[in-house]
Amino acid sequence: MANQEVLIEAKQLVKRYGDFTAVNGIDFQVRKGESFGFLGPNGAGKSTTMRIIAATLTRTSGEITILGKDPEKFGPEIKAHLGVVPQTDNLDNALTVEENLYIYGRYFGLSKKFIAPKIDELLDFAQLTEKRSVKVETLSGGMKRRLTIARALVSEPEILMLDEPTTGLDPQARHILWDRLFRLKEQGVTLLITTHYMDEAEQLCDRLMVMDKGSIMAEDSPAGLIKNFSTKEVLEVRFGSDRNADVAPQLKEMCERIEVLPDRILMYADDGEVLLHDLGQKGLHPLTSLVRRSSLEDVFLRLTGRTLVD
Amino acid sequence: MITDNAVLIAQSRRGRFAESRYSGRAHILLERSLIAFRNSAWLAVLSGFFEPVLYLLSFGYGLGHLIGKIPLQNGHVVSYAMYIAPGLLATSAMNGAIYDSTWNVFFKLKHDRIYQGMLQTSLGPLDVALGEIGWSLLRGFSYAVGFMCVVVPAGLITSWWGILAVPAAVLIAFGFASVGMGITSCFSTFQQMDYINIAMLPMFLFSGSFYPLTVYPGYLQGILKSLPLWQAIAMVRDLTLGIVTWGILWHVLYFVVMASVGVTITTQRLTKLFLR
């Protein structure tokens, strides 16, 4: 991946709305075939960055090129390179499923002859073949999302951009969607994803940029981030909301690092079971305890002092 | 288009007129409207045809029976139905255009976010504005033709100039649709949409559809003559009654300016909303 062609490159990218700085001088590169994620809480500047890439928002300063082109100079061309799946569905409710795919292809200037076989292929991919003549309004949330993704693929884009692809979907619908996206990834489609779900980021992204308040906090593979910013395991303990703060100083001395959350304390160590055993030795008996692998949530907590989803 | 590669298609527009705002594909919007139209809304569209016909029956023949003949400035005398028919034609062109370009546009803009979807493709805001206004125009055209199919056999059009009432109705629809879409794209809530109704009804009642403006004092006549519906009615009435002078070109110019202003506002608003 590292020696692949650079598709997107941003240097000191800034977006301000009046006094508010949404994106604060970020640099990044996305390479061909890569699945690149922006991870961060709401308001981190992820969607703003996506819209600047998609040529639907102008930047305040800095440089950005998509396939070597400046989106402010070559807007329509950039948009022809990209497939866009926005955060909120904007399917055409007056049309059926297949008409949505058809007309979207027409917006790019593609011919009917080209689009017709494409529709069959995309309906199959999105598992919507049986729904082809149905009005879009009647589809479930998961189906609408899959249709939006299929629609974004009509023009055979080099880069697929997904803004919070599974927000608001139930777990089953999310897994179906992840499976579809994983297939695209295997086919070599470059994916650009924003998410505030760490499981999504871990599942789909080769490389992640952790964002907070418009800035980049860290950038690496999911495993690399966990390795660099957390321990192998985490022991979660609850002593009851009154006692948590009292025992915290004691716990702090027993492991690499702790995080005191309102309802629980996270203890970072390479072996959680051993740590739990040590607690018992010292006469500290938590009401509940859980040993788990470190996740991106822990990375985020370490980097920003806050949780991702609150 | 020879190629079926979205990027090459977009590239072929380099250096053309307004390349970042216009892709030369406004007609695709018409294609979309046609598909959407096939899927629904037949009844609503038919009602737009019946409305002026019902007014004509009720006022023209009903009320007209009591009113009798109307003397014109040039000395001719016409029946009341003949007098109001052009007013109703102009009004129906206005109503059709306004309905499409205000409520329908507002819904697509705010609720379904269809324009956002279009503008994330290589279409430009000028394509969207022209395509949507073009659809209103087609609707204005079909209402005008439908109305003519009623009034010509009824003997209410006495001049060959009357044929030009159809393109005149299209021009009227163009003006109203452009400004309607321009204003709607500036609105953000449903409540604001009511302003349009507040403006439309009095304009319909007092712009000389049913009686000459000469019943009003001079200053009021001046105000009413500056409004688009009076301009529309005066233009169509001159044509259907065959009282054509060079002065009719002022009405044409009025609508050309109105349409240009509307298209410009719409394009700028869509750019601001979706391509800031």
Image (spheres, rainbow, N blue to C red):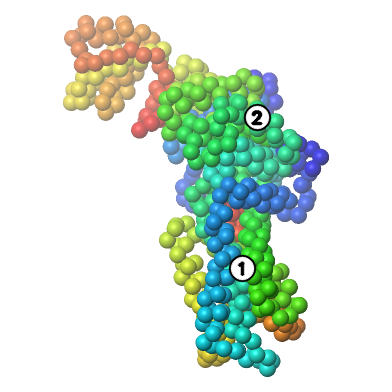
Q: Amino acid at mark 2?
A: Asp
Give the answer, above or below, for where A305 lies relative to B100: above
Image location of residue B22, percent across then percent down: 70, 52
With respect to residue A89, does B242 lie above or below? below
Q: Are marks 2 and 1 on the same chain?
A: no
- The Cα–Cα distance between marks 2 and 1, rounded to whole angstroms, is 41 Å
Report which residue position mark 2 lands on: A120
Task: Give the residue type that dot 1 points to.
Answer: Ala
Q: Residue at x 46, y 37 (%)?
A: A44
Q: Residue furthest right?
A: B2
Q: Chain of mark 1?
A: B
What label sits on residue B271 in the rendered view? none
- Write the residue at 49% across / 36% down: A139
Name the residue that disc number 1 marks: B93
Residue drawn 57% across the image and 63% down it: B48
Disc 1 element: helix
Q: Quadrant of residue B249?
A: bottom right
- Give A231 or B91, whichever is nearer the viewer: B91
Q: Is residue A191 visible?
A: no
Q: Position of residue B224 (x, y in %)?
A: 55, 82
Q: Considering the numbered disc 2 on the image, is that residue within a helix, a strand or a loop?
A: helix
Question: Mark 2, chain letter?
Answer: A
| Whether residue A243 is visible | yes
